Amino acid sequence: MRDPARRADVIIIGAGASGMMAAYFAAGRNRRCIILEKNEKPGKKLFITGKGRCNLTNACPRDEIFDHIVSNPRFMYSAISSFDNRDVMELFESEGLRLKTERGDRVFPVSDHSSDVIKTLTQALDRMGVRIMTSTTAKSLIVEDGRCVGVRAEEKGKGTVSFFADSVVVATGGLSYPLTGSTGDGYRFALSAGLDVRDTSPSLVPFNIKGDICPSLQGLTLKNIRIRITDEKKTLYKSPDVGELLFTHFGVSGPLVLTASSGIMPKAFLGDLRLHIDLKPALDMEELDQRVQRDFAGMSNREFRNSLSELLPSKLIPVIVSLSGIDPAKRVNSVTKEERRRLVSLLKDLTLEIEGLRGYDEAVVTKGGVSVKELDPKTFRSKKVEGLYFTGEAVDVDAHTGGFNLQIAWSSGHAAGMSC
Ligand SMILES: Cc1cc2nc3c(=O)[nH]c(=O)nc-3n(C[C@H](O)[C@H](O)[C@H](O)COP(=O)(O)OP(=O)(O)OC[C@H]3O[C@@H](n4cnc5c(N)ncnc54)[C@H](O)[C@@H]3O)c2cc1C
């Protein structure tokens, strides 16, 4: 017999960003909703977003959002057109959360607390009668005659139970930061229902770098630099703007690196890739050579190793001196033109060998997931299995940092919530 307490119009798996947004709109249409959440509380990943401040969207003009979606931007067109960044801001403000816009159009709560974003959503869901069943892990979908009719789940203390509904929304997130609850369950559900799942890989993630240069520079942040990534044949990626790079004990991180990680096909990382750092992007080779000559002229008797303090952060100087091949004790007035040229080339192109991407534990998002070909872009409903929806990071869509990944979660949640 079907227990009425476990029967609803809509079952949503996952009380993350997209699951809660789907529930908000489904409940707004008077659908009885139950959210199953494996964690002991909702929004565990939301809590850590934006370094605990939650960069919940980006206030750029709507069309620019698509430039920041790396995989399948066209698939997102309909969902974002129906519920865009302004709609997200309006929704949260109408629910009492005051917002502010910072550098790069990043939108945060005025309080700087991601917990307020979670509280706003959970209070609204509570008001609308949505039941969030925490410590309840969905184990499998119940599919009968090509239609998803429910979910088998493990309810803490009660063992395996079945939930039944007309629609099931899988909003389980990806594989990144698995401690927050995203352990790729949605992909398993999709495969079991016969849907295609595209290969996944960590994205918006730091790089491991070969050699001992990075550990020696650990903690150093380079500002206003540019990077390029090449394989044996060609340039695969060029940073569009100057930005920051951080050296760590394993390699490199920071905004420039994270963005680069999402701009390259994951397969390429299996080959030999090089990271090229332009330490002085504002100057071309000629201008930089003149600058070095001017610096050297002002300190002609100084040893080479003590001559770069105007040009470089102190931690980087011994590395550049060593890589330049110029005798550190040589007086700068006897550095040859050829040596100076070598130094300038090095400053324009400090090359490091990439060993690979770091893992899901450090990846802001997961690339890949449920193939967009399986879903209707207006509703995020499966084309194959009736009553089944996939939203958020579980789907093969990912974007740059700046609030765009949460925008994808909100817009896809809205699309499913308005349809189911
Ligand atoms: C450190 C970090 C910082 C980030 N900062 C930002 C930011 O500032 N701005 C931005 O736009 N994006 C940010 N992101 C990305 C953003 O958090 C995600 O893209 C977004 O949360 C995805 O939403 P989602 O609803 O698809 O998945 P999630 O928010 O991950 O929610 C999925 C939920 O499903 C639950 N779940 C999974 N499997 C099951 C199951 N079998 N049964 C029951 N429940 C289950 C999980 O416990 C989880 O609560 C950040 C990510 C990380 C890791």
Image: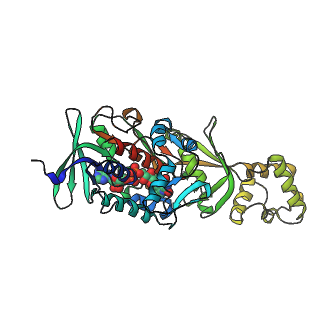
Image-based side of 336 in relation to 317, left or right: right
Closer to the camera in the image, 252 or 379: 379
Image location (x, y in percent) of residue 123 = 35, 62
Residues 184 and 120: in front is: 120
For the image shown, how many numbered marks are present on the structure?
0
- Residue shown at 33% from the left, 45% from the top: 186
Q: Looking at the picture, does residue 240 appear above or below residue 218?
A: above
The vertical placement of 194 against 215, above or below, is: above
Is residue 338 placed above or below 310 in the rendered structure? Answer: above
The image position of residue 355, as x and y in percent, is: 54, 48
Residue 151, percent across and down? 22, 46
Residue 285 percent across, percent down from the top left: 80, 47
Residue most extreme to the left: 1
Q: Is residue 271 visible?
A: yes
Q: Where, by quadrant of the figure, is residue 329 drawn?
A: bottom right
Q: Quadrant of the C terminus?
A: top left
Foreground of the two, 57 or 206:
57
Is residue 175 among what the camera can see?
Answer: no
The residue closer to the viewer here, 174 or 352, is 174
Quadrant in the rendering for residue 326: bottom right
Q: Quadrant of residue 103?
A: bottom right
Residue 31 lies left or right of residue 340; in this view the side is left
User: Colour scheme in the image?
Assistant: rainbow
Left or right: residue 289 compared with residue 15: right
